[in-house]
Amino acid sequence: MAKSIMVQGTTSNAGKSFLAAALCRIFRQDGHTVAPFKSQNMALNSFITDEGLEMGRAQVMQAEAAGIAPSVRMNPILLKPTNDVGSQVIVNGEVRGTMSARDYFAVKKTLIPDILCAYESLAAEYEILVLEGAGSPAEINLKSDDIVNMGMAKLAKAPVLLCADIDRGGVFASLYGTVALLDADERKMVKGLIINNFRGDKTILDPGVKMLEELTGIPVVGVVPHIQVDLDDEDSLTTRFSAQGKKGLLDIAVVRLPRISNFTDFNALSRLECVTLRYVERTADLGAPDVIILPGTKNTMDDLRWLRQSGLEAAIFKHVSRGGPLVGICGGYQMLTEKIRDPEGAETGGEICGMGLLPGDTLFYGEKSRTRVCGRVEGATGVFAGLNGAAFEGYEIHMGRTAGDLNFARLTQGQETAPDGMAVGNIWGSYVHGIFDRGEFAQRFVNCLLQNKGLSGEEAVEDWASYKERQYDILASSCRAALDMDRIYGILEEGI
């Protein structure tokens, strides 16, 4: 059976996912077979495996760092929030239903057999498993039913590395306070502390590190610097939504819907030198972008209502009336159609008029579409005519079906082909997540927009997958230099 080690954090967004990815890449570089594992993930960024099963993107990233194909076993439970008090519950890649937080807490311990089955299956195949916690292990109101932090560490008999983000402030208090709130048996499982995201002169930090070790009796196994690395984020705590990035020739505005999902679709565009990619949630911030993108959402109908109430729908209509390009992906594509119906209550029930910019209707069903696809653009028009012939690949994950003149692209799924999306004038929509990841497609997309401004096209664009490989190596190199890997290997060997 595999040896295991677990990365927990004092808060959400403390850097657990990236540290786990770094360890996966380091162990792989050192010649070990390694796989990630997170028993329960809550995120709207999800992924479809080759088997058509749904899992969180954080473990996809970590699997890529480990050099292996993502498997739903790496994330047996995925919670996708549908509103402020409820989530769609996905177990082993399949939807179990939508539950309120209270109802889920009442049943989640019954999912332990599913968790253990997935964990033990991976442990039989790999030498090392890198586990990731969620939020904080010191949420004392939730500890009795915990299945993702110390509860999981106990099930897996995994020693714990506890990390905190110093950039947030209060790093010593958060590490010490978290350890202090753990039960005595849990404190014994914490074998190392990590200070993450440090900027500055480490020697100034050293006295505090020494005092922290004396207070907790736990060694600090690394002070990881702030690392400039470009990888997929786990969820809506991402800094991408507020980042003030470079000023490029192209201004791409992505509408930040309240239930935005799979915003990782646009990471492949944001890294291009010619692109400024912004997330917009107010009409005052929209400006005059070169293209507006409506992204995926976990609740198309409610987010369309928000779009209207916020005034952004009217601003988008004004943009389109001037000939401005507009793109919809998945839920954003559904919003562009004429009518959205939900007779089975898959979302909120009833029906709503869409934006009417694409000539089709969307009908929701209770069954979710989950499939990986590849395809080629055939019917792009207007500004985007240069996309015709461009190949792409990605995945579909949605509750609704759209009927109409599906003319944008032709998809291939095994031996079968099917149409996807619609294109009218300078507007197109598609159900395919990850459509911009191929370098050729991203290049053609930005070239269409550049040429619309009277500018020359870009040079060849690297595929997002190969770009990410370089990012994993940067992440691993920086973390290897900052972490006491000899001590971490010792912790791994010793266990608990």
Image (spheres, rainbow, N blue to C red):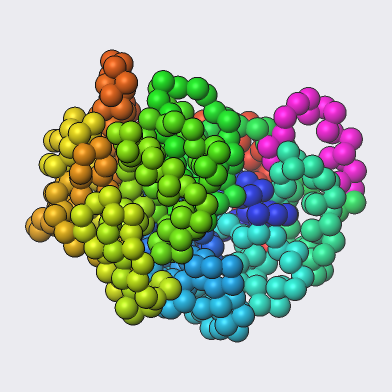
Specify whether 40 is left or right of 273.
Answer: right
- Give whichever of 271, 419 is nearer the camera: 419
Quadrant in which residue 361 is drawn = bottom left
Give the residue drawn at x 42%, y 31%.
289
Q: Is residue 92 visible?
A: yes
Residue in view at x 25 percent, y 37 percent: 426
Q: Mainly helix, strand or loop, the magenta region? A: helix
Q: Is residue 304 above or below residue 17?
A: below
Instruction: Determine the residue positioned at 71% across, 73% down.
Output: 143
Is 199 magenta? The answer is yes
Classify residue 144 as left or right of residue 475: right
> Which residue occupies 43% across, 47% down?
314
- Residues 120 and 91: in front is 91
Picture coordinates of residue 251, whole percent (x, y): 43, 29
Front one among 127 and 189 = 189
Q: Eyeballing the image, is 61 above or below 159?
A: above
Closer-to-camera residue (310/239) = 310
What number of labels is visible?
0
The percent coordinates of residue 461 (x first, y second) are 31, 26
Magenta stretch: includes residue 330: no
Residue range in magenta is 196-214
Horizontal and vertical percent for residue 397? 33, 60
User: 269 left or right of 417?
Assistant: right
Q: Whole-percent x and y of residue 103?
A: 57, 82
Quadrant of the rendering where the C terminus is positioned: bottom right
Query: Do we see residue 26 in this rendering?
Result: no
